[in-house]
Image: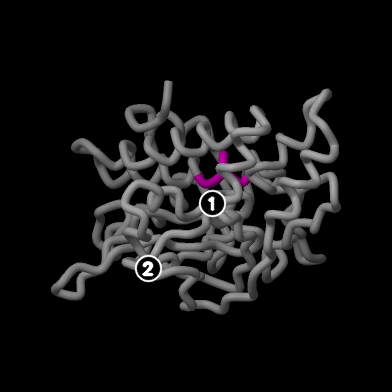
């Protein structure tokens, strides 16, 4: 869970997931649900667990992988936040997304057999490395692993659709904040208070907005008491109103 200090603020760093054990993954792990269903053979779970290699720390700005590198593994964020991005021939960066603890990075490399983007640490990041060749072999033996892998692939394919269309800056920002909150909550963190680790410029780039626009929208949200911002600490005060603003971008 996100830790709150004695002043009521979030601790300076988000907590890392527990390490699990030989029959249980970390609490935030994308494959954690595979450990839970009754009837799954424990020896098979051991076989899945030993595929995991804990890697890190990666410091702010360090690459987990680079565009064009040969694909060999997918990564689960264990602590910190990872940005995926591409840089064009003119040196312009496009931020594709932000990956929180428990989320997978590298799934979009499966078809081209090489990583199509950079994955960069935005703070101190720890990851779990899954050899994809070993994982797919095991998936043929354990239906739960295969089903989870297919679901992760399907979710990754659908992520880009939320930025399509002609939406206002307020709609995009409200949807972005609600999406972050939902993703943190799904991993057991606070659904209303979290740290915006990503710089404002990266948020603006991802939402296809100007940095000044992002700052103005956040100020308007604060003035309307929809959110509270203290540095990089953010609290959602009126999620219903934010949902109303973002209704055209939220899944039905």
Dividing the picture into quadrants, the one containing residue 247 is: top left
Crowdedness of circle 2 by 10 Å Cα count: few (<14), some, many (20+)? some
- At a point 63% along the width and 44% down the height, the residue shown is 30
Figure coloring:
one colour
Residue 211: % across, % down: 29, 64
Residue 84: % across, % down: 40, 60
Dividing the picture into quadrants, the one containing residue 231 is: bottom right
95 with respect to 62 (left or right): left
Q: Which residue is mark 2?
A: 69
241 with respect to 211 (left or right): right
As helix, strand or loop, the secondary structure at mark 1 comes to helix
Structural distance between the alpha carbons of marks 2 and 1: 15 Å
Badge number at residue 211: none
Residue 226: % across, % down: 49, 43
Compared with 225, 158 (above or below) is: above
Q: Can you see residue 204?
A: no
Compared with 173, 5 (above or below) is: below
Residue 41 highlighted magenta (yes or no): no
Q: Nearer the viewer, residue 67 or 212?
A: 67
Q: Which residue is mark 1?
A: 132
Residue farthest along the top direction in this orientation: 252
Residue 181 highlighted magenta (yes or no): yes
- At a point 34% along the width and 67% down the height, the residue shown is 67
As helix, strand or loop, the secondary structure at mark 2 comes to loop
Crowdedness of circle 1 by 10 Å Cα count: few (<14), some, many (20+)? some
Q: Main secondary structure of the magenta part?
A: helix
Q: What is the magenta range?
A: 180-185
């Amino acid at each position: 869970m996100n830790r709150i200090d004695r002043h009521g603020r979030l601790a300076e760093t988000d907590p890392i997931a527990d390490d699990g054990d030989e029959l249980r993954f970390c609490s935030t792990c994308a494959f954690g649900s595979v450990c839970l269903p009754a009837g799954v053979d424990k020896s098979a779970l051991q076989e899945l667990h030993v595929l995991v290699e804990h890697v890190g720390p990666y410091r702010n700005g360090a690459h987990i992988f680079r565009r064009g590198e040969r694909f060999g593994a997918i990564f689960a964020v264990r602590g910190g936040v990872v940005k995926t991005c591409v840089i064009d021939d003119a040196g312009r960066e496009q931020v594709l997304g932000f990956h929180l603890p428990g989320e997978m990075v590298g799934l979009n490399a499966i078809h081209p057999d090489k990583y199509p983007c950079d994955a960069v640490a935005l703070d101190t990041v720890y990851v779990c490395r899954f050899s994809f060749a070993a994982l797919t072999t095991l998936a043929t033996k354990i239906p739960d692993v295969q089903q989870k892998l297919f679901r992760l692939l399907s979710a990754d394919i659908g992520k880009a659709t939320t930025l399509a269309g002609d939406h206002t800056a307020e709609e995009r920002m409200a949807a972005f904040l609600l999406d972050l909150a939902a993703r943190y909550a799904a991993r057991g963190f606070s659904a209303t208070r979290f740290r915006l680790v990503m710089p404002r410029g990266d948020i603006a780039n991802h939402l296809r907005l100007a940095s000044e626009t992002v700052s103005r929208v956040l100020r308007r949200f604060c003035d309307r008491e929809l959110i509270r911002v203290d540095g990089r600490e953010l609290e959602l005060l009126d999620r219903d109103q934010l949902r109303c603003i973002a209704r055209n971008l939220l899944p039905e």
